[in-house]
Image (cartoon, rainbow, N blue to C red):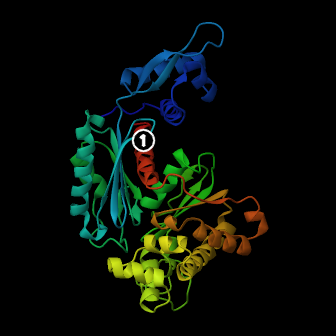
């Protein structure tokens, strides 16, 4: 198992090297508030732990040339992003570059044992290619439901029957023989976009994931805000329609019941059967079922019904985001998840609603954009989560 840094100075140095790559001692000294002699002591101690290595001579700044320092090239993190209908597994190096990434369709309702068997099989496949010969130094896991964060345990997740209270962190830590951290999948998407995506330079932002369910990652001052019990950002269960459709959570009229991947597919099938769209009807005949991807394809072909379904859904999402924007005043709103295949049609109606409803002071310079990383956002966020843990004082 990897050594952990002994103090906050070492932890800070490791995170700097993770986020900005190899650095000279002189450059590191500019970024952390340490005297040259104290910095030298901390760097030497990190070299002894094997967490960092010397990496050639740095460019001269006058006087003796300093050595570059980088994170150990052999460090490996495993990122596992469990969605409602698929699993993504990736191996990264210490700088969180994805070295290998596999995806497998899987229904989360099959339960934790079956899902983790599949996740471990994918991890073993990546290891077998020589990407992580020495095993993993840590693993981050995302699940599509609320998580009691300190214990790494899902709590009453509406779309995950059989997962309530399952000790994900403990079970996988034993299987993998390394530290494991568990979080909600939307928080990890936010962390991924913050580390390597569209939110790189933003301290306060919202990351909305629209897939089988709908959730929101909240980043405040560069840190994910999880709330008192870990359920912050559960916006899919905000009511948008009094006495509306029944939702999996037991309430009526939730955003998720009216616009999510599943709700969109159901509405598209109803429209196709009612003869409102020849494009959707043809797709339904061919496949026997419709998905959000079919709606996106029909909209791209100019189908009026598909465009209207997307516009209505975007309005509902925009209505909820407008309330969040007025309350939180973020610097950016990122939209990601499976339904982002609906792309700019969805984005346009979300933007219209938010700009119309929120105060000009909150929306004057507010970009509302699609995520940059697609399916890699969750696994990069998972690697970021576990690296934050490994690169924190023991």
Quadrant housing the C terminus: top left
Give the structural element (helix, strand or loop) at label 1: helix
Q: Is residue 20 above or below residue 206?
A: above
Residue 168 or 347: which is nearer the viewer? Answer: 347
Q: Is residue 73 above or below residue 323?
A: above
Quick check: 296 left or right of 390? right
Please give the residue where the numbered disc 1 appears in the rendered image. Answer: 387
Quadrant housing the N terminus: top left
- Residue 61 seen by the camera: yes
Q: Residue at x 46, y 19 (%)?
A: 55
Q: Is residue 157 above or below residue 34?
A: below
Q: Residue at x 39, y 65 (%)?
A: 144
Percent position (x, y) of residue 36? 59, 17
Q: Is residue 142 above or below residue 309?
A: above
- Residue 257 seen by the camera: no
Quick check: 347 left or right of 13? right
| Residue 114 figure quarter | bottom left
Percent position (x, y) of residue 347? 61, 67
């Amino acid at each position: 198992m990897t050594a952990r840094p002994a103090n906050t100075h070492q932890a800070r140095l490791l995170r700097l090297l993770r986020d900005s790559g190899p650095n000279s001692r002189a450059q590191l000294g500019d970024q952390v508030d340490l005297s040259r002699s104290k910095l030298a002591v901390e760097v030497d101690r990190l070299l002894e732990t094997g967490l960092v290595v010397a990496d050639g001579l740095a460019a001269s700044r006058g006087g003796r040339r300093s050595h570059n320092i980088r994170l150990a090239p052999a460090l490996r993190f495993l990122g596992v992003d469990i969605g409602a209908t698929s699993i993504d597994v990736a191996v990264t190096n210490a700088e969180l570059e994805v070295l290998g990434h596999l995806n497998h369709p899987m229904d989360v309702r099959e339960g934790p044992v079956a899902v983790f068997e599949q996740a471990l099989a994918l991890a073993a496949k990546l290891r077998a290619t020589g990407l992580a010969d020495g095993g993993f130094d840590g693993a981050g896991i995302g699940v599509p439901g609320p998580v009691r964060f300190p214990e790494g345990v899902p709590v009453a997740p509406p779309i995950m029957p059989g997962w309530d209270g399952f000790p994900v962190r403990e079970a996988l830590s034993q299987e993998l023989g390394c530290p494991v951290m568990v979080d909600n999948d939307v928080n990890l998407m936010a962390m991924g976009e913050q580390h390597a995506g569209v939110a790189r330079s933003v301290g306060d932002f919202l990351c909305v994931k629209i897939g089988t369910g709908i959730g929101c990652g909240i980043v405040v001052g560069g840190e994910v805000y999880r709330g008192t019990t870990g359920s912050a950002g559960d916006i899919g269960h905000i009511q948008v329609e009094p006495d509306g459709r029944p939702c999996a959570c037991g309430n009526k009229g939730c955003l998720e019941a009216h616009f999510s991947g599943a709700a969109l597919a159901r509405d598209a099938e109803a429209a196709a059967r009612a003869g409102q769209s020849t494009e959707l009807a043809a797709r339904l005949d061919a496949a026997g079922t419709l998905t959000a991807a079919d709606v996106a394809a029909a909209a791209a072909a100019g189908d009026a019904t598909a465009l209207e379904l997307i516009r209505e859904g975007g309005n509902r999402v925009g209505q909820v985001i407008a309330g969040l924007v007025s309350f939180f005043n973020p610097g950016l709103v990122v939209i990601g998840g499976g339904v982002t295949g609906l792309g700019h049609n969805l984005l346009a109606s979300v933007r219209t609603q938010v700009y119309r409803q929120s105060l000009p002071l909150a929306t004057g310079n507010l970009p509302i954009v699609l995520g940059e990383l697609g399916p890699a956002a969750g696994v990069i966020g998972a690697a970021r989560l576990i690296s934050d843990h490994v690169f924190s004082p023991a």
